[in-house]
Image (spheres, rainbow, N blue to C red):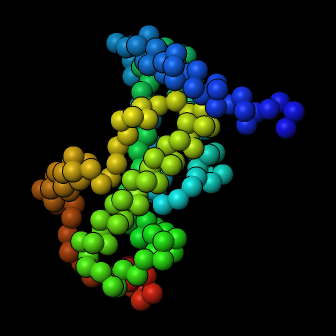
Amino acid sequence: MRANLPEKEPVLVKKWEENKVYEKALKKNRGKPSFILHDGPPYANGNIHVGHALNKILKDFVIRYKTMSGFYSPYIPGWDTHGLPIETALTKITKVNRKEMSVPEFRQLCTDYALKQVNNQREQFKRLGVLGEWNHPYLTLSKEYESMQIKVFAKMVEKGFIFKGLKPVYWSPSSESA
């Protein structure tokens, strides 16, 4: 590439971090009306792909526009660190046989794998030039996040939104999941 982007881009990202561009933009607009974009988190199960890139870059455009329009617009990235996509990636990539270990052992491996992928994806998103609270993301495996989910669920139960009914549940024998 004649523009030498693979060499120039990490230097530019580093300069933005050193100059605290994101933090200065937030500080400039502190106290002004807020614009909050709630970002649906990607699974922490491997490298990002073009869909992740498109999603994050478009959201970054919106947040930067709102910031430049005078809104206080913090961006807190997050990752979904639970679930079958992480279990599947772990078993396929590392060849772990989850049937040969206890459930707590397998869950710990999944946690370790997910946290490694969070760090990997964080660096990949930063390389795309996306600005945000990269050192303080939300992770669905954090105890604080889980406790807030339980509180929200309890409110839904209190309001009668949760009920037991009858419907078929399709079960996948191979992935052992609904």
Left or right position of 105 against 119: left
- The residue nearer to you, when weighing 89 against 165, is 89
Q: Is 103 left or right of 8, judged from the image as shown?
A: left
Which quadrant: the N terminus? top right
Left or right of 152, for residue 135? right
Q: Residue at x 34, y 85 (%)?
A: 99
Asked which quadrant contains residue 36, the reply is top left
Seen from this angle, which residue lies furthest right? 2
Rendered location of residue 29, percent (x, y)? 42, 13
What number of labels is visible?
0
Whether residue 159 is visible, yes or no, is no
Residue 155 rendering spot, x and y as whole percentages: 16, 52
Residue 1, compared with residue 113, is above or below; it is above
Please identify the quarter of the rendering in which residue 113 is found: bottom left
Q: Quadrant of the C terminus?
A: bottom left
> Percent x, y for residue 41?
44, 49
What residue is drawn where x is 53% and y is 41%?
123
| Position of 177 relative to 50 (above/below) | below
Q: Is residue 102 visible?
A: yes
Q: Looking at the image, which residue sits at the far top? A: 28
The answer to which of 16 and 160 lies nearer the viewer is: 16
Q: x, y (%) of residue 110?
A: 36, 65
Residue ID at (62%, 46%): 53
Residue at 49 percent of width and 43 percent of height? 122
Name, please, the residue furthest toward the left.
Answer: 158
